[in-house]
Amino acid sequence: MDHLQQLAQTVIQWGALLLLFFVGVGALWIFVIYLVDKTQKIHTIRRNYPVIGRLRYVFEHFGEFFRQYFFAMDREELPFNRAERSWVYRAAKNVDTTIAFGSTRPLDQPGDVIFLNSAFPVLSQDSADAGAITLGQGSCKQPYTTKSVINISGMSFGAISKPAVRALSRGAAAAGIWMNTGEGGLSSYHLEGGCDLVFQIGTAKYGVRAAEGGLDPVKLAAVAAYPQVKMFEIKMSQGAKPGKGGILPGGKVTEKIAEIRGITVGQDSISPNGHEDIRSVNDLLDMIENVREITGKPVGFKIVVGQIEFFHDLFDEINRRGVLSAPDFITLDSADGGTGAAPQPLMDYVGLALRESLPMIVDKLVEYGLRDRIKVIASGKLITPGKVAWALACGADIVTSARGFMFALGCIQALQCNKNTCPTGITTHQKELQRGLVPAEKSLRVASFAQQIVHDVGVIAHSCGVSQPRELERHHVRVIESGGLSVSLAEQYPTPVVSQKINLPPSV
């Protein structure tokens, strides 16, 4: 008994000493921080309020998470609100996506859309699939035919992780949709899932770049030799950073990424802000023709709409050269698109949103007689069935999404894509964080999300009285204006007069 009492007393004494030690270390640490804050001359708050002033930065950091989970309402957050994310999560998990009691979406917000239901909706037994679209018919040796309504937009290996690319590739194959490689080049992880691929040629020409910086025809032909690579997309600009090239921090440039891109490990990957060999519409059409000739596959370009004169000049030149000189598709990205890293002034202030640019450019194609020749792909925050249906009604042939599929992978909108600290393993190359993203499981969610989008867009189409999504037109949509009243989208963007009618070749 005495022995136990002595042991307990010894433990208490040592515990007291340890407590005193830690208190002392803590006090010393606070004193050092006090001296550092008081003597530094950079931060006013820390100089005036040493130690305590540092709490400001802690609160700023955790404020994002508290707003997201505790304070923000369902429809308040940006860039995507909780209602949008929740729908994607449920769709990806293949669980019930219905809701009860009433929508939390206001029906009086200017700019929002309403679809007009028919008194005689299409019955389930009379519905049809989305129908096939062929890109490059008559202009190249290997045109591409697809039924997919929604596809995976460009996300580079580097911007996203190896397991993320693997999951997207497998999921895309299961859903029968394509995956855009992004400007970071083609990796084995893109290929292993077996999905159709669109190879993106960025301003740095990663994966197809010659030693002196131009386009390498040998490397380009080698990429085209993969049967899975169906099309090529020349990236002129993207939504979040028009006029700025890709930005991949050096911390995310691993040996594998450096090998694929042809750059140095650990060095920032900063793409030029434009193509050095594309400085006019003639250069662009020459590049399109060159890539199409080398690859034998459809070629288009991706752009954020800005100065409209570009499209007038482009379409005039196409009609001068002949219809087959046209790009096989144009991907229109929205100014509110996403990216892993971009200057805030570009993200906030430059470029037109898809809401305005999509119907505008579709109308320009009609006006110049090129609508049947050039397919239109729409991209930019189109992650819910209503937004996809709106894009199709405006004239898009196909829709692509990046962030929608990121949510399907488990993205929680932590806004850390540029820091290599993504907690869900999607945009980080830290092995311990990637461990949580299991490609075999997440690929099922990718496929389920894509399939649910198509199903629910079909539900909207049937309600409007058409048998399949690509039959939606502008008269099926009304746009809310100030005061809560709406106007027909067909009145906002009436069918333009065809000023330059051209005759397509018989094979197109």
Image (tube, rainbow, N blue to C red):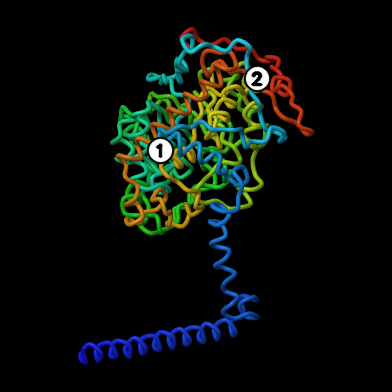
Amino acid beneath label 2: Leu
Vertical comparison of 184 with 285: above or below? below
- The percent position of residue 25, horizontal first and vertical second, equals 43, 86
Q: Position of residue 303 (x, y in %)?
A: 56, 35
Residue appearing at x 60%, y 10% in the figure? 120
Q: Residue at x 32, y 52 (%)?
A: 435
- Secondary element under disc 1, as helix, strand or loop, is loop
Crowd rating for badge 1 (residues with CA inside 10 Å; few <14, some 14–19, many 20+):
many
N-terminal label among 1 and 2: 2
Please state which of residues 116 and 304 is positioned toward the viewer in this rendering.
116
Q: Report how far apart the C-alphas of labels 1 and 2 lie in the structure.
A: 37 Å
Tell me where residue 216 sits by quadrant. Answer: top left
| Amino acid type at mark 1 | Thr
Q: Is residue 192 left or right of residue 53?
A: left
Front tag of 1 and 2: 2
* Residue highlighted by disc 1: 181
Q: Secondary structure at mark 2?
A: loop
Q: Nearer the viewer, residue 412 or 141?
A: 412
Of the pair 113 and 367, the residue shown nearer to us: 113
Q: Is residue 148 visible?
A: yes
On the image, the x and y values in percent for residue 475 come to: 67, 17
Q: In the orientation shown, which residue stands out farthest toward the right?
A: 483
The residue drawn where x is 49% and y is 23% is 328
Is 143 positioned to the left or the right of 32 in the image?
left
Quadrant of image for the N terminus: bottom left
- Residue 90: horizontal and vertical position, in percent? 45, 36
Disc ID at residue 116? 2
